Amino acid sequence: MKFHRTKAAIAALSMLAIPVAVVGQEERDPAPGSVFDLGNWKIDLPQDEDGDGRSDTVEVEEIQDYSHPDFFYLDDQNRMVFTAPNRAITTANSTNTRSELRYMIRGTNRRIPTLSPGNNFAVRGRRNSDRFGSIGGRMQATLQVDHVAVNAGNPDRNPAYSVVVGQIHAVRYDDTTSGFGYGNEPIKIYYKKWPGHETGSLFWTYERNLARDNPDRSDIAVPVFGNLWDNPDDPGENGIALGEEFTYEINVHNNTMYVTFTNERLGTVGHAVSLVQGVDELDNPQSYGGDALYFKAGAYNQCSAADRPGFWYAACGGTGDWAVDQANGDYAQVRFSRLEVGPSVPFQGAVE
C-alpha cells in the first residue's frame, strides 16, 4: 500500500483506497480488564459517584477489575463497551461527555507525574525526546459504533450526531511561550450518522496547533469512508453502518503519523502527515514537534447538550436521567473487540 505525505496543505492529502477481498449486570464482574490488557490505561466516566463535582476517573491501579453496568462493561462476546449519554457530568474544559480511556506509559508508577515526559510520548525531532516515555507509538483498534445521538437542537453544527472513537491529545502546558502546550489534537477519529440514513461516515480531523484564542485554530477534516461532518447527504454504500466493524491504526514513527483504516467491505485507506511541519501556512510551523502526546480511545460523545453560540454546541437532547436518555436515543455507544498500544513500527510501503 502506498501512502501520501502531507507537507504544504492537508487539503492535498491523497487518499489511497485498496479493495479488500471479503476476507449489564449490577455485579462488576467480569470486568473489561479480564479480557483486555488495561495495565496502562485509566478511564474517565460520565458520572460523579463520589460527589466531588468532577467526572469520575478510575486509575490504572483499579481499572483491571472495574466495570460499570451502563457505561463500561464486557458484552456477551467479550467486547469492551463504552457508553456516554449527551447530558452528564464532563471533564474540565469540555461540554462533551465521555467514557474514554487515556494511555498511561508509567503504568502504576506514581512517582512519574501524569503530565511529565515520562508518562507521554514525543516525536523524534522534539528537543529532549529521549526523556519521554517513548518516541512515537502505535495504537491499533477493531471496533463498531452501536449508536450516536439522534436529537440535536442545532443539527447544522458539525459535531451533531457524532462520536470520537480514538485520538492523540497533546499535554497542556502552563507556559506556552515555546509555541507549544496548547492541549490540541493532531488526530481525532470521528464517526457521524445523520438520523434517517442507513450508514454513517468515518473521517478524522487534524487540529492546527495554535493558541485557543487564535481564530485559525480549527479542525481540518479528512475523509475515510463516506462524507465529512458538514455534508448532510446519505453516504449510502460508501459509508459504515451502525454495528459494522472497522479497524484503525495510528502509528507515530519518528516524526510522521501514519493513519490506516480498514473495513472488509470498503477496503483500506491510508494517510501520512508530518508532525514536525505545519500542514499549511496557517498552522504552527512545527506542527506538534514540541509537544508531549498521549493516546485516547473509547466513546467521546460529540453531541454536546449545551446550547450556545459556537461551532461545538449542538444542543443535543438529554435529561440527565440515564434510563430516560437511553430510551430517547440521547447517547453514544462504541464496542471494541481489539485495543492495543505498543512501540511504533517503520512504515513498510512507499511514501510519495
Image (tube, grey):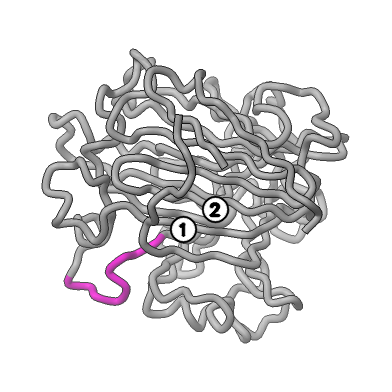
Percent of width and height locating residue 126: 19, 42
Q: In x, y percent, where is residue 337?
A: 65, 67
Q: Mark 2 falls on what kind of element?
A: strand
Q: Quadrant of the C terminus?
A: top left
Nearer-the-camera pick, 240 or 33 = 240
Image position, residue 184 (x, y; %): 36, 36
Depicted 9 relative to depicted 226: above or below: above
Residue at the spot 51% in from the left edge and 19% down from the top edge: 11
Q: Which mark is residue 55?
A: 1
Tell me the CA gap for discs 2 and 1: 9 Å
95 relative to 70 in the view: left or right: left
The answer to the question of whether label 2 and label 1 lie on touching residues, with beta carbons closer than 8 A, is yes
Q: How many labels were placed on the picture?
A: 2
Instruction: Give the answer, above or below, for where 263 lies relative to 51.
Output: above
Verify whether residue 286 appears in magenta. Answer: no
**Picture layout, residue 188 above or below residue 22:** above
What residue sits 28% from the left and 33% below the top? Answer: 276
Disc 1 is placed on an element classified as loop
Lateral position of residue 70 relative to residue 96, left or right: right
In the image: residue 219, left or right of residue 290: right
| Closer to us: 266 or 73 | 266
Q: Name the residue at 59% across, 38% down.
A: 304
Whether 106 is among the magenta residues is yes
The mark that comes first in sequence, 2 or 1, is: 1
Q: Decide: is 294 above or below 19.
A: below
Query: Of the residues shown, which amino acid type is indicated by label 2?
Result: Arg
Most common SS among magenta residues: loop
Residue 135, image quadrant: bottom left
User: Label 2 belongs to which residue?
Assistant: 98
